[in-house]
């Protein structure tokens, strides 16, 4: 960014470059008029997040000639209401006189619920502008994001990426953020980003006569750990049937259930699924990065997240940790953090029933809508679900089950924790049996990933102009309209439905898998063999 593009009130020497290897696409900016200012009235701007939906918020401060006081209105939550004490202490620590008058701060639109500490800086700037300490016009046309410490330092906040995207789209490209969030904000093209370490530094940029102390910036909080090396599928010995199911799942975006005894390789196979998936496209990368920004698990030094995420929560996880939760407006959980990636539940029957049943909504609709008293938050959650389960509590109830020590009712009760409605939404269900000695490894991850990428390209071309990206997302009516198989081809599915091993929803799932098998084989449409193979992979051989 050239110095000429920097407003006069903010010197170019403190600008953060906005160039990035992976720019974030934003809508065309819509200019927002700067409100008129008057004596005793100061304005600034902030951004409020409700889920991933960002709203530009006008912060207005009015100083009344009355007894000293500080009132914050506009549906703030508890953490935001505490901004009154943080702002007062930060202003004093910055060497600026606190206005000894009655202060009323309004967050507009007042009907929008607002939460979090990211409004602190905007509230402080609006108050100082009303007191005549800052230039009111410069403060009113700038978005301020950041939490204030009692010593006047700026602390990083979550959700900076979607907040800056919304600010630029609203025609307000000048954004001030904490230095720890500057690299993340700089990913948005068109944003004129400044990273500040203290409130005094921001006040000086806006024309205040204040000394800027030399301080060490507050480091970023929780960040995602360094990416683990990609696990190779060649490490899995044998398991041809399970490897085929894994490749089909990757090629079509299908959900997968693997049932088998301990040590058969279920966890190894699931951990290697992300390596088979292609890189995220621009739109998906922005969605995934925004979710992790709100969750606080995004490292801006790596740019946009280009690889599909992988989440594998422990079976003691609560429903709130999986689908999202928290005080006030809920935060994204593991299901949303796995958006456009893989959610792996190892030892699936050990998870609580409430946890498993909460996954039915995202499996069907690709998003989570979380309702709380403070409002509703909507998060994307189009992930691939991979379940691994033992056949019984002792894990040896495979084949003839001669080594199994479980009673019949124990087996039924154990596997019944995976409800019928949940399993009906899982496209691929395979058995993973122990391999005998002498089994040889199959293809490496790079070889299988190349076949997966080719199949996905074929499906994307067929689905061009539709809202779907993979075969796993396509509804059954569209498939049947596109592919009109002969009655003889569908006879096996009809028999499976009559026997009760396949539901009508399961018929659509089988058709999706058949299309994926055809894409992997390079055929224009599925044939009878593809349909039979898809039925086998769906019912673990019980419906063929």
Image (cartoon, grey):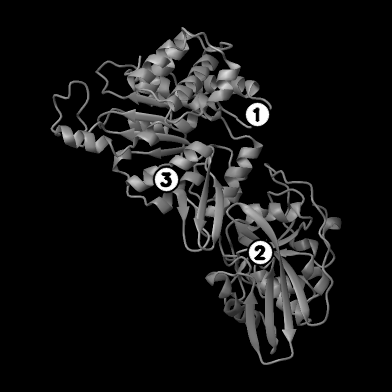
Instruction: Give the CA separation, mark 3 to mark 2.
Output: 34 Å
**Dot 2: element:** loop
Q: Is residue 121 left or right of residue 244?
A: right
- Looking at the rendered structure, the secondary structure element under dot 1 is loop
- Which label sits on residue 358? 3
Side of 194 relative to 382 (left or right): right
Mark 2 lies on residue: 145
Are discs 1 and 2 less than 8 Å apart at CB? no
Q: Report helix, strand or loop for mark 3.
A: loop
Q: Nearer the viewer, residue 433 or 424?
A: 424
Q: Earlier in the sequence, mark 1 or mark 3?
A: 3
Above or below — where is 228 with respect to 510?
A: below
Expressed as whole percent of the image width and height from the top left, the position of residue 303 reads: 62, 45
- Quarter of the image for residue 217 reads bottom right
Q: Which residue is mark 1?
A: 466
Mark 2 closeness class: few <14, some 14–19, many ≥20 residues within 10 Å: many
């Amino acid at each position: 960014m050239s110095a000429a593009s920097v407003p006069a009130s903010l010197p170019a020497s403190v600008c953060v470059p906005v160039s990035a290897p992976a720019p974030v696409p934003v809508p065309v900016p819509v200019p927002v008029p700067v409100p008129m200012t008057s004596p005793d009235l100061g304005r600034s701007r902030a951004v409020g997040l409700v889920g991933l939906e960002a709203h530009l918020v006008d912060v207005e401060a009015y100083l009344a000639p009355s007894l000293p006081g500080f009132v914050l209105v506009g549906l703030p939550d508890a953490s935001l209401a505490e901004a009154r004490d943080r702002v007062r202490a930060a202003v004093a620590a910055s060497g600026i006189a606190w206005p000894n008058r009655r202060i009323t701060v309004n967050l507009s639109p007042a009907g929008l619920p607002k939460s979090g500490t990211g409004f602190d800086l905007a509230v402080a700037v609006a108050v100082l502008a009303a007191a005549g300490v800052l230039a009111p016009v410069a403060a009113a046309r700038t978005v301020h994001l950041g939490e204030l410490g009692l010593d006047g330092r700026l602390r990083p906040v979550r959700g900076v990426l979607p907040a800056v995207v919304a600010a630029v789209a609203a025609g307000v490209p000048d954004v001030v953020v904490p230095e720890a969030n500057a690299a993340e904000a700089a990913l948005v093209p068109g944003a004129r980003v400044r990273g500040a370490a203290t409130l005094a530094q921001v006040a000086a940029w806006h024309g205040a006569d204040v000394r800027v102390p030399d301080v060490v910036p507050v480091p970023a909080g929780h960040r995602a750990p360094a990416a683990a090396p990609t696990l190779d599928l060649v490490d899995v010995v044998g398991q041809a049937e399970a490897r085929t199911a894994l490749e089909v799942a990757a090629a079509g975006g299908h959900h997968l259930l693997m049932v088998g005894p301990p040590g058969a390789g279920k966890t190894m196979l699931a951990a290697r699924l992300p390596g088979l998936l292609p890189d995220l496209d621009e739109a998906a990368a922005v969605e995934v990065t925004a979710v992790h920004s709100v969750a606080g698990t995004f490292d801006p030094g790596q740019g946009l997240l280009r690889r599909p995420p992988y989440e594998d929560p422990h079976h003691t996880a609560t429903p709130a940790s999986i689908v999202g939760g928290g005080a006030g407006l809920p935060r994204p959980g593991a299901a949303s953090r796995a958006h456009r990636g893989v959610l792996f539940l190892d030892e699936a029957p050990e998870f609580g029933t409430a946890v498993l049943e909460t996954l039915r909504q995202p499996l069907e609709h690709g998003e989570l809508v979380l309702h709380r008293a403070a409002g509703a938050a909507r998060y994307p959650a189009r992930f691939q679900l991979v379940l691994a389960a033992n056949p019984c509590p002792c894990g040896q109830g495979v084949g003839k089950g001669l080594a199994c020590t479980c009673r019949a009712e124990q087996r039924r009760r154990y596997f019944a924790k995976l409800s019928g409605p949940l399993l009906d939404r899982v496209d691929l269900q395979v058995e993973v049996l122990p391999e005998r000695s002498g089994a040889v490894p199959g293809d490496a991850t790079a070889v299988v990933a190349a076949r997966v990428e080719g199949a996905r390209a074929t499906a994307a071309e067929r689905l061009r102009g539709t809202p779907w990206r993979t075969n796993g997302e396509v509804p059954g009516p569209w498939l049947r309209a596109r592919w009109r198989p002969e009655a003889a081809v569908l006879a096996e599915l009809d028999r499976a439905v009559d026997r009760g091993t396949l539901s009508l929803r399961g018929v659509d799932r089988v058709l999706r898998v058949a299309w994926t098998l055809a894409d992997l084989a390079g055929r224009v449409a599925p044939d009878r063999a593809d349909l039979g193979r898809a039925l086998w992979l769906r019912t673990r051989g019980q419906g063929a």
